[in-house]
Image: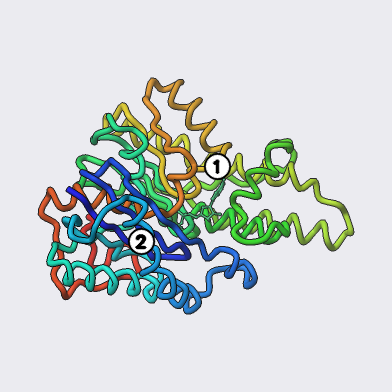
Amino acid sequence: MIILSIESSCDETAVALTRNGREVLADEIFSQVKMHAEYGGVVPELASRSHIEVITHLADLALSKAGLRKSQIDAVAVTYAPGLIGALLVGLNFAKSAASALGVPLVPVHHIRGHIAANYIAFPELEPPFTALVISGGHSLILDVKGYTDMEIMGTTRDDAAGECFDKAARVLGLGYPGGAAMDRLAKSGDDKKYPLPRAKVDDAPLDFSFSGLKTAVINIAHNAAQKNEELDLPSLAASFSAAVSDALVPRVIEASNAAGRGVIVCAGGVAANSRIRADLLKACEGAGKTLRLAPPALCGDNGAMIGCQAFYEYMAGNLAGSGLNAYATMDSGALFK
Ligand code: KG4
Ligand code: ZN
């Protein structure tokens, strides 16, 4: 089964063609990151306008790279939630038009489920059940993935997402936007114990975490240094910060996998590319006797193939949409997500 999949939830326009979920025939992506970097963050209206400019071209490119004709497409899939509403609507409308013109089913895909599915592409033998840590610019979640389309949230952030926290801290350190990857590179030459940073706990919710105190602590360190005209040890602050984010996430994923009785742990989302988190997860999983499945960094960020992969399983489960499908900005509104 060949699926044309569309992803436009934030600042990447992505179109892919996949066969039977896990075989990627083409995976085209256009990143708007340079345009938004000028403003220090994603400007929603510019994002929507850019999606509309490139989406048709990307679909044509994907078809020609895969060597397929339009008539060979069996279904069209699209991210319908969560994300920037205007950005989502561009992809959704394109997908609806394509499905209608081709006379094929329309498959709605939840973005977070798509991130998890990136690991099915990277690991052909991977199957649920497992515990998933999804860490992206907009979300931080620990999930019990019971089946391809059956998952439950076990832990989440009470405030900022991990990626958002990386980006805000990086901005204060003058690393540009989005700063997660730059922080990661800088941290490699730093001392992770030089700056003591808080590790928050959420009362009565041991699997939930909070990053706002950490973000504020980094901002305060930077402002105090500026006021006193002291030079910051940027690599060490980046390393101390990365260690604090990792400490908030890694032990909780292990705890969640123990609570759910799962032996496999999967990590997904843009922040899953972080080298400190990857190394800590590996060490913790070895120590706890868990199998870790970590997709290569290229599959961690937003892409169209992950949406096509999850769409195959949604299709198999009968989760199809009609022409009235709408887009939703938030995690749980109108979602297939429970
Ligand atoms: O999953 P993603 O591409 O988009 C969303 O769905 O949000 O994640 C983007 C986030 C950004 O916050 C970016 O700074 C962060 O992932 N990121 C990283 C790294 N690479 C990307 N954060 C930390 N370390 C990295 N190496
Ligand atoms: Zn994402």
Mark 1 vs ligand 1: CB below 8 Å = yes
Q: How many marks?
A: 2
Q: Outermost residue, right direction?
A: 229
Please tell me whether mark 1 sits on a helix, a strand or a loop: loop
Provide residue 110's location: percent of width, then percent of height. 28, 58
Q: Residues within 10 Å of mark 1 (few under 14, many from 20)?
A: some
Q: Is residue 322 visible?
A: yes
- Residue under numbered circle 2: 7
Please tell me whether mark 2 sits on a helix, a strand or a loop: strand
Horizontal side of residue 113 vs 216, given as left or right: left
Q: Earlier in the sequence, mark 1 or mark 2?
A: 2
Provide residue 302's location: percent of width, then percent of height. 42, 54
Towards the viewer: 189 or 261: 189
Q: In the image, what residue type sits under mark 2?
A: Glu
Provide residue 250's location: percent of width, then percent of height. 47, 36
Is 132 drawn above or below residue 79 in the view shown? above
The residue positioned 31% from the left and 64% from the top of the image is: 81
The residue positioned 53% from the left and 58% from the top of the image is: 164
Towards the viewer: 12 or 196: 12
Rendering quarter of residue 330: bottom left
- Residue under numbered circle 1: 274
Q: In the image, what residue type sits under mark 1?
A: Asn
The residue positioned 26% from the left and 41% from the top of the image is: 145
Q: Nearer the viewer, mark 1 or mark 2?
A: 2
Q: Is residue 107 visible?
A: no
Q: Residues within 10 Å of mark 2 (few under 14, many from 20)?
A: many
Provide residue 195's location: percent of width, then percent of height. 72, 43
Horizontal side of residue 130 vs 196, given as left or right: left
What's the image's color scheme? rainbow
Screen quadrant of the C terminus:
bottom left
**What's the distance in space between the residues labelled 1 and 2, CA to CA?**
22 Å
